[in-house]
Image (cartoon, rainbow, N blue to C red):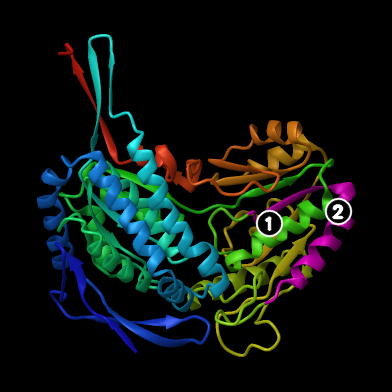
Amino acid sequence: MKEYLKFYINGEWVDPVTPKTLEVENPATEENFAVISLGSQADVDKAVAAAKAAFPAFSKTTVEYRAELLEKIAAGIQARLPELAEAVSTEMGAPMWLANAAQVPAGMGHFATTAAILRNYKWQEVKGTTLLRKEPIGVCGFITPWNWPINQIACKVAPAIAAGCTMVLKPSEIAPIDAMILAEIIHEAGVPKGVFNLVNGDGPGVGATLSAHPDVDMMSFTGSTRAGVLVAQAAAPTVKRVAQELGGKSPNIVLPGADLKKAVAGGVIQMMTNSGQSCNAPSRMFVQKDQQDEAIAIAKATAESVKVMMPAEAEPGAIGPISNGNQYQKVQDLIQKGIEEGATLVAGGPGRPEGFNKGYFARPTVFANVTNDMTIAREEIFGPVLVMIPYEDVDDAVEMANDTVYGLAGYVQGPEEEANAVANRIRAGQIQVNGARPDFTAPFGGYGQSGNGREWGEEGFEEFLEVKAVIGYKAA
């Protein structure tokens, strides 16, 4: 059992004010492999005080200095990539191939990309006799999830450092180990004391306290819409900025002119990656009704080809377990709900895959003949479950795609000009056309109950800035 019992506050590893521990479970084995401390209000107060004290000096450091810090952190992640990948895989169940190829490199990529953005950013401009200045917002509180842990931490920490902010991070208590390693990397990179602080804990003990803290100027939260509402409510009395990246039920419109086999198979694979635990997963596939039979056959064959394996042994393309027991049960309940509501079960279904009698492993599942009002078409399942919805024409597909409380992402497959036109009609923060690869410079965030604000790229960097207008400015 590995022990991670200290918090990183003001540049040092310190004991919690009141000892309280939590064991961290490996979802592939249902066995505990590590133990962490759970923080309290007293720990949050110490961390916020350190961040507040560090802000005046750090906010005045040079762009080049902060860019070099980001690059040192990226290099530190690269140097410890195998260790970080193993931590991510063990704590949340990602197959080692995915942890090495995407989970950890994505986090590293955000630090490197943000350094480049910082060096080229225009901090002030004169409009007439008014000077517009961009300044760091102050002390930031971060609450991050378990599904892409180091990636989501990097999305917040990198732009905050770039902007000259200071911060307190509460990583997910389900997947906290990668964050502890990252804190070591940040320390070794020479980030000044108090700039980055880490307090482990749960939502009520640390998350709510951080959100409500009067000395925190901004909260950035990634997680469920339900929890995001709680963060916003706690933050409201102090009128701090709240940036949220929340849930999704993203549409994937396969146009009649698309390469059906490529589009459907690609959509299934993308849905199953990371065991379906991606907020922007293409979970609703819309296929024209005359192509349904062929599309269903392709989806069935593709889903049945996806292997479920132990994370350490998984070959490329295979998936691991759901990240925790509560989420596993939610996935199972929603699969059962789909059956009860009359959707056609094409592949997978309830229970563990053959050969597994423990671990939170779910079967790659596809439902067809789904209507957009069914529970499985409305609620975010966050597991390897795809729903296929037939449409009459493209207008019908777009109308159903937008008939959701969410608006995080969307996908369109088909002839380029038509696909681009349909992309412009989907109400979501990021649209991928014809399998385009992720772009770290592209803003990521949602409409509606998928949140507010943006991460990634220049827009994500600007979330951490205030705008000051100096009226009557006269250049020297």
Residue beneath disc 2: 292
Q: Residue furthest top?
A: 128
Is residue 150 magenta-colored?
no
Q: Is residue 328 above or below residue 144?
A: below
Residue found 42% across the figure and 82% down from its top: 25
Which kind of residue does numbered mark 2 sit on? Gln
Which kind of residue does numbered mark 1 sit on? Met
The reply, left or right, for residue 367 in relation to residue 85 is: right
Mark 1 surroundings: few (<14), some (14-19) or many (≥20) residues within 10 A = some
What percent of the width, then of the height, locates residue 138?
20, 44
Residue beneath disc 1: 374
The reply, left or right, for residue 70 in relation to residue 65 is: right
Mark 2 surroundings: few (<14), some (14-19) or many (≥20) residues within 10 A = some
Residue found 27% across the figure and 9% down from its top: 128
Precedes in sequence: disc 1 or disc 2: 2
Is residue 296 magenta-colored?
yes
Residue in front for this viewpoint, 445 or 54: 54
Q: Is residue 129 above or below residue 117?
A: above
Answer yes or no: is residue 340 visible: no
Disc number placed over residue 319 in the picture, else none: none
Q: What's drawn in magenta, residue-wise?
A: 282-307
Answer yes or no: is residue 301 visible: yes
**Alpha carbon separation for disc pair 1 and 2:** 18 Å
The kind of secondary structure the magenta stretch mainly shows is helix
Mark 2 lies on a secondary structure that is: helix
What percent of the width, then of the height, locates residue 298?
83, 61
